[in-house]
Amino acid sequence: MNLVLLGPPGAGKGTQAARLREELRLPYLSTGDLLRRHRAKETALGLAAAEYMDQGQLVPDELIITMLMDAVNGPPRGFLLDGFPRTVVQAEALERSLDAAGSRLRAVVLVEVPDQVIVGRISGRLTCPYGHVYHAQVSPPVRAGVCDRDGETLVQRNDDQVETVRRRLSVYHESTAPLAAFYERHNVLVRVDGNQAPDDVFDAITAALGVTPANRA
Ligand code: AP5
């Protein structure tokens, strides 16, 4: 099963991906997490990407496509993608790669959340260096400031300042939202209301994908 999670910053893609990857036993790739790992290691790609990320802009397509194809190490076979594609150019590159592998997307799940909800969500977000996500009110860690999963210190992301979040939202509407129409034409778009409790969002996604308790991994 090849799945893509699409949606504005702070829609809850990472939160839902953490559950879906366990539920469906799919290899998971988040371009945001990959980029943050490159930055932490100060690779050439990480250094090139840093400025774009901190300004809330998209990293250039060619850097992202090369990074992702390197990470999957050949044509992708069975995956959950979070944060890719984000432009029509990236979506076309993914289509070509899947075509070459004789594969296709099963679904693109668009998690929809109004802009006015996003800023509150992101300003309360805490993450660990391995990408585990919390929210100070909605899903706090057991011990304040410490990741439940790996004991690492939780921090606020560089790009989670209010002004940067607003810029990311406007970049989303300009460059990424048009992908909904792109995937509607390919008959793979599934819209899910992300403005409800995380458990309810998860149930809506699995119902839309036809994943029931009986056929879960
Ligand atoms: P990336 O890391 O992909 O960020 P994003 O898409 O902006 O998404 P976020 O990680 O901010 O949010 P999310 O939807 O995962 O929400 P989360 O689950 O954390 O990208 C960062 C940057 O990298 C980009 O700006 C760009 O520069 C670059 N980049 C990455 N991919 C790229 C690409 N393909 N091309 C070019 N550039 C690229 O949830 C948010 C908060 O809300 C959390 O605190 C969570 O606990 C809480 N929450 C989650 N669900 C709910 C709920 N249902 N109710 C209440 N609170 C909730």
Image: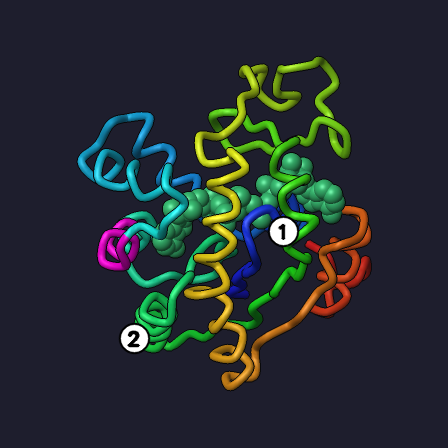
Q: Amino acid at mark 2?
A: Ala
Q: Amino acid at mark 1?
A: Ala
Q: Is residue 161 shown in magenta? A: no
What residue is at 68 percent from the left and 54 percent from the top? 217
Q: As rendered, which of 97 and 175 lies closer to the eye?
A: 175
Tag 1 residue: 11
Tag 2 residue: 100
Q: Quadrant of residue 62?
A: bottom left
- Mark sitting earlier along the chain (1/2): 1
Q: As rendered, which of 187 and 167 lies closer to the eye?
A: 167
Magenta stretch, residue numbers:
60-67
Outermost residue to the left: 44
The quarter of the image that holds ligand 1 is top right
Q: Secondary structure at mark 1?
A: loop
Disc 1 CB within 8 Å of nearest ligand 1 atom: yes
Q: Quadrant of residue 148?
A: top right
Residue 75 appears at what percent x and percent y? 32, 63
Magenta stretch, main secondary structure, is: helix
Q: Nearer the viewer, mark 1 or mark 2?
A: 1
Q: Residues within 10 Å of mark 1 (few under 14, many from 20)?
A: many
Mark 1 vs mark 2, CA separation in Å: 31 Å
Residue 69 appears at what percent x and percent y? 29, 55
